[in-house]
Amino acid sequence: MTEHFDALETRSPEERERALLVALPAQVAHAKANAPFYGRLLADVDPDTITSRAALARLPVTRKSELLETQRANPPLGGFLAAQLSQVAHVYMSPGPIFEVDTAAADHQGAARAMYAAGFRAGDIVAGMMMDASARALGCVVVPGGVGNTELQLDAIAAIRPSGYVGTPSFLKILLDRAAEQGRDVSSLRRALVGAEALPAVLREGFRARGVSVLQCYGTADLGIIAYESDALEGMIVDESILLEIVRPGTGEPVGEGEVGEVVVTTFNRAYPLLRFATGDLSAIQPGQSPCGRTNIRIRGWMGRADQRTKVRGMFVDPAQVAAVAKRHPELGRVRFVVDWVDQADVMLVKAEATRPASELARAVEATVQALCKVRGAVELVPPGTLPNDGKVIDDIRKIEA
């Protein structure tokens, strides 16, 4: 049994980066030529110039809200599809509603590597439907299932004896708890790949105590799998099929290694290309390489939401405005708006890191906040490194009693 899915997982980082940047201009050109949304968005962009991460960072990000808006305005799929409808196998609906598609291509969900890292192999029987195509791409047999019908699924587990589970950790716990209550035999389950929810350490340990080894993956319905754990349990390894950036929330500006920011992904999916797709999730690049031998970059997993938009005194304040304030004053480091409820009124404090705090700078920042956000905020300048590295630029700490 080999430890890795293929040689791509263990190639040198330099080789991987070259391959991604060689493929990037062609994918941009393909999206521009075949997906009407990107044809409009990139009308003035020469794809042949997008040959570096710096060049990619100059392209606009695409947000989930744009998917919703354009799909409503331009049915059926808003101009994101870069293939003929005859090539689409399924159309899925997620909250919004937003529609996602897949094709008949093997492993269209991009989860085969994640499942392989979790121990799934050809011939395994897998309970779950969440990553059906990926399981079949590995040669696994899939027992369709999902949240609900717990008793029927326990019957199926007892009768078919699957060795693995793919789905949410909460439903796996429900299955195991119910089986224990009723004395049902689910001992065939030895491994699981879970996602879509948090996996606290105590829950993972609880599964392990029941004989089930559980690893987690991170992805979205639009993009498929973005990153996944290996047995090393040191961060999440980015999938080989995507180009990942971490950007400052509210902007498309990449941040440095270790800095918390929003996860932005460019896919190389030909049927449904997404360029610089902002997930709305926070994470950070984890330095170094995984002890498991996989050499791709790692992220620290899901660290919260980047869309921190809130209303202050009747006016919306969002991360893009915080970024605009910081950009107007380059002498500032991290900037954070702290919103509180004091004496039955909204109060906003602007905390900003500055190497040389001065009252003149504080007054200038306060004026900028008023001009850009239309809301007053007192400014507190603090030494560099004072504000947490958590990606949070708007901290709403209001506790309003009814």
Image (spheres, rainbow, N blue to C red):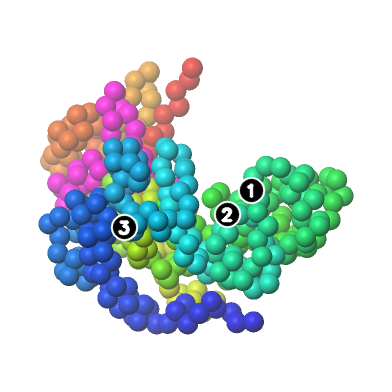
Q: Which residues are magenta?
A: 304-330
- 3D distance between C-alphas at marks 1 and 3: 30 Å
Q: Earlier in the sequence, mark 2 or mark 1?
A: 2
Closer to the camera in the image, 368 or 68: 68
Q: Amino acid at mark 2?
A: Met
Closer to the camera in the image, 7 or 264: 7
Residue that label 3 marks: 82
- Which image quadrant for residue 351? top left
Residue that label 2 marks: 130
Closer to the camera in the image, 156 or 88: 88
Q: Position of residue 33 (x, y in %)?
A: 22, 60
Residue at 56% x, 58% y: name it: 131
Can residue 149 be seen here? The reply is yes
Going by the image, does 119 lie left or right of 75?
right
Q: Amino acid at mark 3?
A: Ala
Q: Earlier in the sequence, mark 2 or mark 3?
A: 3
The reply to whether discs 1 and 3 touch (Cβ–Cβ < 8 Å) is no
Residue at 61% x, 60% y: name it: 193
Q: Position of residue 209 (x, y in %)?
A: 75, 59
Residue at 24% x, 32% y: name it: 377
Q: Position of residue 168 (x, y in %)?
A: 61, 51
Residue 324 part of the magenta-drawn span: yes
Q: Earlier in the sequence, mark 1 or mark 3?
A: 3
- 3D distance between C-alphas at marks 2 and 1: 8 Å
Residue that label 1 marks: 146
The reply to whether discs 2 and 1 touch (Cβ–Cβ < 8 Å) is yes
Q: Quadrant of the N terminus?
A: bottom right
- 3D distance between C-alphas at marks 2 and 3: 24 Å
Mark 2 surroundings within 10 Å by alpha-carbon count, few (fewer than 14), some (14 through 19), many (20 or more)? some
Q: Amino acid at mark 1?
A: Gly
Going by the image, does 149 lie left or right of 379?
right
Going by the image, does 206 lie left or right of 49?
right
